[in-house]
Amino acid sequence: MNYLAADYSEYLNNQYAKFYGLELITTTRKIESLNSSFYIGASLGYSEGGLMGDEWIYGTPSQWSSLDSVKKIYHVGNIIIPAYSPDKTLSGWNQKLMLTYKWDYTIRKLGLWFTLWAQQIVYVRNKYVENNNKTALGYYSDIDGGKYIPYTSDVPDEAKFKTFYESELSTPIVDTWTFNINISKSLYRGAEVSFFVNNFLDRTNNIFYGLEFSMDINKIFE
């Protein structure tokens, strides 16, 4: 009994991902007359991913008896597995520009400080592309226990296996804002409690709020 190589499967890490980013920050010292400091930050990120293209791509096995009349002429064996070139393929990319604005205000006598900050997503652009419109370079057959047979120049195009799948998805997001506030109170040396509300001006999405407590043990025993 002959066995075809299709009976063996192996999982490969055949994908790649790249990430790039640029961040710019401008901040002021505390302005004593206003008890305030200001911060503006900008971040630009880009990422992409796809197939590395260093491994052959194999199609779904087909029974020779199920092939059309043209393919039957140019393929031999009982089980046919088309083989496609390992081209490096971009699957998609993502780009995001975000600005952050922050105002810190302190009341030293009461041990209070307020932070009001906003995040502006200037834009998010992403695209996911799957383009598998390829023509096989040959096929594997169950002859001699699994044999690769390349297509020769006399094999017409209509006799070769092909993939016909292509899709593109783009979901741009432009100019969205979130506003957040944080109120903190010093309890004693090295400890503070904070109340925060995130996204408090957006009525279409959930508002997040809560309490935080932090303590620096080292400062307590100094």
Image (cartoon, helix red, strand yellow):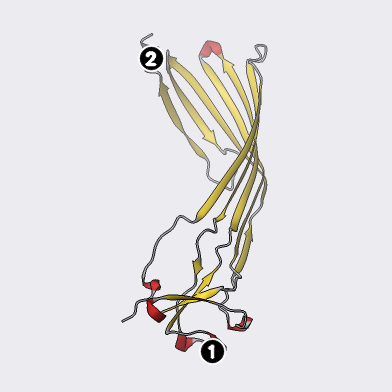
- Locate residue 217, reporting x and y percent: 37, 17
Horizontal relation, residue 128 to residue 61: left or right: right
Q: Give the percent coordinates (x, y) of residue 182.
A: 54, 28
Residue 69 position, x and y percent, is 54, 91
The x, y position of residue 7, in whole percent, is 36, 72
> Residue at 56% across / 30% down in the picture?
181
Which residue in the structure is indicated by mark 2?
218
Of circles 1 and 2, the one toward us is 1
**Figure check: 109 above or below 8:** above
Q: Residue at x 62, y 79 (%)?
A: 153
Give the farthest residue toward the left: 1
User: Which image quadrant: the C terminus?
Assistant: top left
* Relative vertical location of residue 118 with respect to residue 186 in this rendering, above or below: below
Placement of the N terminus among the 4 image quadrants: bottom left
Q: Residues within 10 Å of mark 1 (few under 14, many from 20)?
A: few
Instruction: Please tell me whether mark 2 sits on a helix, a strand or a loop.
Output: helix
Under mark 2, the amino acid is Asn
Camera-side residue of 8 and 48? 8
Helix, strand or loop status at disc 1: helix
Mark 1 → mark 2, Cα distance in angstroms? 82 Å
At 58% from the left edge and 44% from the top edge, which residue is drawn? Answer: 19
Q: Which of the two labelled residues, at mark 1 and mark 2, occupies the earlier sequence position?
A: 1
Read off the residue under disc 1.
Answer: 73
Q: Are marks 1 and 2 in contact (CB under 8 Å)?
A: no
- Residue at position x 44%, y 28% in the image: 212
Q: How many marks?
A: 2
